[in-house]
Amino acid sequence: MSLLHDIDCDDISVDSVIRLGRIPEADDEKPRPILLRFPSEEQKNKVLSESKNLKTTRVGRIGRIFIHQDLTPKQRECRRKLVDELNQRITNGETNLMIWNGKVVQRRTTKAEPQETVARNIQP
């Protein structure tokens, strides 16, 4: 609940919380993921959209918490391939890339309108 509070989702209710995976045998293993179930799609979407704020609100070990939508194994494999392609293209020198709609694409940049300078002759 404190994580939901940190991302300004105090009005979100959680139906169930399930810890996934096996209990780690060694202390240095990755922590097990947690599955949260929400009563509505709108609440889930709000949490996912606000989860980007976790990066700026948490520090230290707890700052490594990520919130992702639950994906099927096939979707995870497709996503993994896209991330590999993205990393390869970045290594090759391309910049300003992102994954959008199942493809690696160039981010749209907004061109700032050139400011017009008005020169006036001011006579003393």
Image (cartoon, helix red, strand yellow):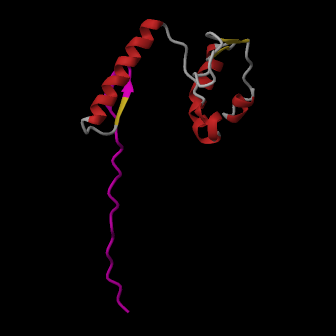
* Name of the residue lying farthest toward the bottom: 124
In the image, residue 115 lies in the stretch drawn in magenta: yes
Q: Quadrant of residue 24?
A: top right
In this rendering, would 79 be left or right of 24? left
Residue at figure coordinates x 40%, y 17% from the top left: 79
Return the residue nearer the eye: 79 or 8: 79
Q: Is residue 106 above or below residue 34?
A: below
Q: Is the C terminus in the top left, top right, bottom left or bottom right quadrant?
A: bottom left
Return the residue nearer the eye: 87 or 47: 87
Q: Is residue 35 above or below residue 113?
A: above
Question: Picture coordinates of residue 119 (x, y %)?
Answer: 31, 75
Return the residue nearer the eye: 96 or 31: 31
* Name of the residue lying farthest toward the left: 92
Q: How many marks?
A: 0
In this rendering, would 16 be left or right of 96? right
Q: Is the N terminus in the top left, top right, bottom left or bottom right quadrant?
A: top right
Magenta stretch: give its range: 99-124
Q: Main secondary structure of the magenta part?
A: loop
Question: Picture coordinates of residue 25 (x, y %)?
Answer: 63, 15
Q: Quadrant of residue 7?
A: top right
Question: Picture coordinates of residue 81 (x, y %)?
Answer: 35, 18
Q: Quadrant of residue 40?
A: top right
Question: Picture coordinates of residue 86 (x, y %)?
Answer: 33, 28
Q: Is residue 37 above or below residue 62?
A: above
Residue at figure coordinates x 63%, y 11% from the top left: 20
Residue at figure coordinates x 68%, y 14% from the top left: 38
In the image, residue 97 lies in the stretch drawn in magenta: no
Residue at figure coordinates x 62%, y 20% from the top left: 26
